[in-house]
Structure formats: structure tokens, C-alpha cells
Amino acid sequence: GQQVMQIPQYQHVQEGEDFTTYCNSSTTLSNIQWYKQRPGGHPVFLIQLVKSGEVKKQKRLTFQFGEAKKNSSLHITATQTTDVGTYFCAGRRDAGNMLTFGGGTRLMVKP
Amino acid sequence: EAGVAQSPRYKIIEKRQSVAFWCNPISGHATLYWYQQILGQGPKLLIQFQNNGVVDDSQLPKDRFSAERLKGVDSTLKIQPAKLEDSAVYLCASSRQGGVTEAFFGQGTRLTVV
């Protein structure tokens, strides 16, 4: 079956430092999505990537989709305490297919 | 636009008892998902509906879990009988067909089996 893995599992950073989480799929994906889950909350959609090699930016967040459409990354520049939470990638093998989540990367930011 | 509604928010049951969760997706969303999220892990897809048909239920433990989506709107997820390892948050999500198919999640039901 389709597997989506994320590293690292946890990341502690000092406020102002950068942060990156990596996502790898066992199969080629039709698209990949990123979600953020605050402690005690539910996953909230951040972005969807569809094209091979696609790069999208949202303020301090940069999302990339690999050329082979099997991996992706999320980079946060100059982290803030509001960035605290767990970041999940989620992929679909085919459009309309099951949405499989990775294990997530928990980001902790020290002020 | 109203979000995904789930009930109850919390449930504590003894092992071997039964429990049911209810989900009302966002109006017009054709796809409905049930995820199980164990503490510290990512959401695990249990079942995905497209309207009232099942798209995937390969990870649903069918000997004890069942789900239905009558008339392609509301959905219920049932566990019978519950085991200790079923303690988790059960998340319902919905998405529209086509375009950016982001999943909108409900607040979840936190189940504790004792």
C-alpha cells in the first residue's frame, strides 16, 4: 500500500532559526498537500502542490514538490512562536484516490 | 460556510462496549473521510466515501469497525466491540470534487477505552 514518511519526527529551534521538514512517498503522487495541526487542534490545510518541481511560497513558508513527484519539503524561514505545531504532508496517488498522511514533524520554538 | 460537525466531542467507554460517532460534512462536499489519530501519530485513513459509495476501506478493521454514509451526506462510524488500542481521536473530514481538494476537518471525537 501507499506509504508516506516524514523526517524529522521532532525539531526544537530557537526563535528566528529556520526549519525544514521532508516528506517521502513510496509511490509517485498525483498531488501533495501540507497541513498544520496546533496542539489540541485538528489539521488545517496549508497548500496543495500538483506539478513536478513546483515551488510555492506563503510569506515565510516555502513548499517544494520533487521532480519525480515522490518527495516534498516545507521550509520555514525565521521561525516564530506562532509556528509551533505539527506539520503533516498528505499525498494522493491518483486524483480522487485516498489521501494518505505522513507521521508529521512536531516543531517546537523556544522564544 | 459552516464547518464539518462531529459529535460527541469526548467519549469514555469500557472495553467490549460499543460506540458510534457522527459526522456532518460541509454542504456540497462529495468526499468524506474518517481518520483515526493515535496520540503522537499522523492521521490514519480508515475509510473514504465518494457520495454514498466507498472509495477505500482497506485500513478499516472490518471485524469491529463499520461506517456508512446514507444519502451521501451524514456519516456514522461504529466500533463494536471496542478494544483498549482503539483509544484515539477520530477525525472526520470532507472535500469537494475537482480542483484543490483540500480536506476540511472537524474537531474530532476523543475516545478513551478503559
Image: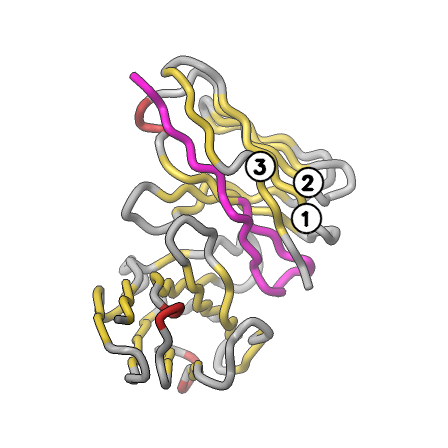
Q: State whether residue B114 appears in this view.
A: yes
- In the rendered structure, find residue A71 and report the number of the disc placed on it: 2
Query: What chain does mark 2 sit on?
Result: A
- State yes or no: residue A97 in magenta: yes
- In the rendered structure, find residue A62 and report the number of the disc placed on it: none
* Quadrant in the rendering for residue A38: top left
Amino acid of disc 2: Asn
Q: List the residue tagged with mark 3.
A: A7
Where residue B114 sits in the image (x, y, percent)?
26, 71
* Quadrant in the rendering for residue A106: top left
Question: Residues in magenta?
Answer: A89-111
Residue found at x 60% / y 52%: A91
Mark 3 or 1: the one toward you:
3
Q: Viewer-proximal residue, B10 or B30? A: B10
Where residue B104 sits in the image (x, y, percent)?
40, 56
Q: Earlier in the sequence, mark 1 or mark 2?
A: 1
Quadrant, the C terminus of chain A: top left
Amino acid of disc 1: Ser
Q: List the residue tagged with mark 1.
A: A25
Image vertical order of residue B24 relative to residue A26, above or below:
below
Image vertical order of residue A98 relative to residue A46, above or below:
below
Helix, strand or loop status at disc 2: strand
